[in-house]
Each structure stands twice: as structure tokens, then as C-alpha cells.
Amino acid sequence: MALLLHDDDLAQRVEALADALRARGLRITTAESCTGGLIAALCTSLAGSSDWFERGFVTYSNAAKTEALGVDAALIAEHGAVSEAVALAMARGALAHSAADLALAVTGIAGPGGATPGKPVGLVWLGWAWRDGTELKADAEHQVWPGDRTAVRSATVQWGLDRLLALAAGRSTR
């Protein structure tokens, strides 16, 4: 997995993200489950990231999602940790528990195990939240990535960085 942190394409994405965030005076936070902090690690690998990276939450367990982000345990029980509802709650919780302007949340099944009926290995939900004046807005989407654990996590990191860059640049994420 160390190779992921040294990928030139990812480094360029993080530099573009940093530039966009600095240009707008914005700060981000991440709430990661299946990526285990890889997005935060990539962001903080760039010198000067404290200008725009506020904090990262690694909430791998359901208890961590509840304790650190305020995700309702009943929501997890009803929808499962890998769901739109939980991805949105994680993003909102990360924003609420930080001084950031934008939040990215990731929850998924990287494999090789963990699949359940209707939730295959490779299913990842991404949620993001942002402050728009006094209003909190959020959105989510999912992908099913092919490949092994490393491939799923790598694709998720790239996708997450792309969504953060779109938000930071003031563009639609879709």
C-alpha cells in the first residue's frame, strides 16, 4: 500500500486540491472507514497542508463512527455501515466535529471478505458535506470497484480527491 502514497498522479491531484482550497480560503476534513486514513495521509504529505487540511477521522468500526462522528447507532443498524445514509451522516458528523468548510466521508467493502446480499466487495459510498452560508448541505454517491483490496482502496482515494477538488473549485461533484 505504500506505493499508493508515492503515486505522481495522486500527488498532482493533492497539489491541485491545495491550490483550489487556498484560493477560496477553505479547509477540509475527512472521515474514512475502508480507506483507513489514506486520503488524510495523502493530503498531509504535502508541505503546508495545515493551511487547508483541518483534521481527519479514521472511523473503521461502527462504534468509532458513533463515538467520533455522532452517527446514530440505529442508523447503522437499519442501513448498515456501507450505505448512503451512513456516508451522509459521517460527512455531516465530520463537519460538525471540526472547523472545516468541506467534509469527505468514505465507507465501503474493500474485501476480500465482508460482502453481504446486495452489498458486494468493491461497494463504496462516498459522502460529502459543506457549509453554504448558515445551511449545511450534503450529497452522496456510490461505486462498485473491481479488483482486490488495494485496487478498491486506490480507486476510492482517487475518486475522493476528485470530489474534494470539484467542491473546492466550486463545481458540481457530478
Image (cartoon, rainbow, N blue to C red):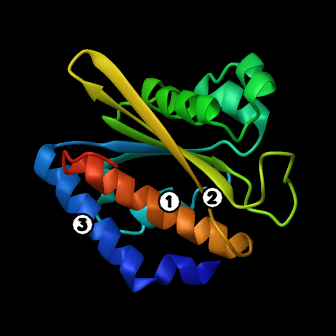
The type of residue carrying mark 1 is: Ile
| Residue 25 to residue 1: above or below | above
- The residue shown at (21%, 48%) is 171
Q: Which mark is residue 16?
A: 3
Q: Secondary structure at mark 2?
A: loop
Proximity of marks 1 and 2: CB atoms separated by less than 8 Å: yes
Report if residue 32 is visible in the image. no
- The residue shown at (40%, 75%) is 10
Residue 42: x and y, percent? 46, 66
Q: Which mark is residue 39?
A: 1
- Of callouts 2 and 3, the N-terminal one: 3
| Residue 40 to residue 126: above or below | below
- The residue shown at (46%, 83%) is 7
Q: Which mark is residue 31?
A: none
The type of residue carrying mark 3 is: Ala
Q: Of 166 and 52, which appears nearest the observer? A: 166
Q: Report, in whole angstroms, how far the alpha carbon at label 1 lies from the one at label 2.
A: 7 Å
Residue 163: x and y, percent? 37, 53
Q: Report, in whole angstroms, how far the alpha carbon at label 3 lies from the one at label 1.
A: 14 Å
Q: Which residue is mark 2?
A: 35
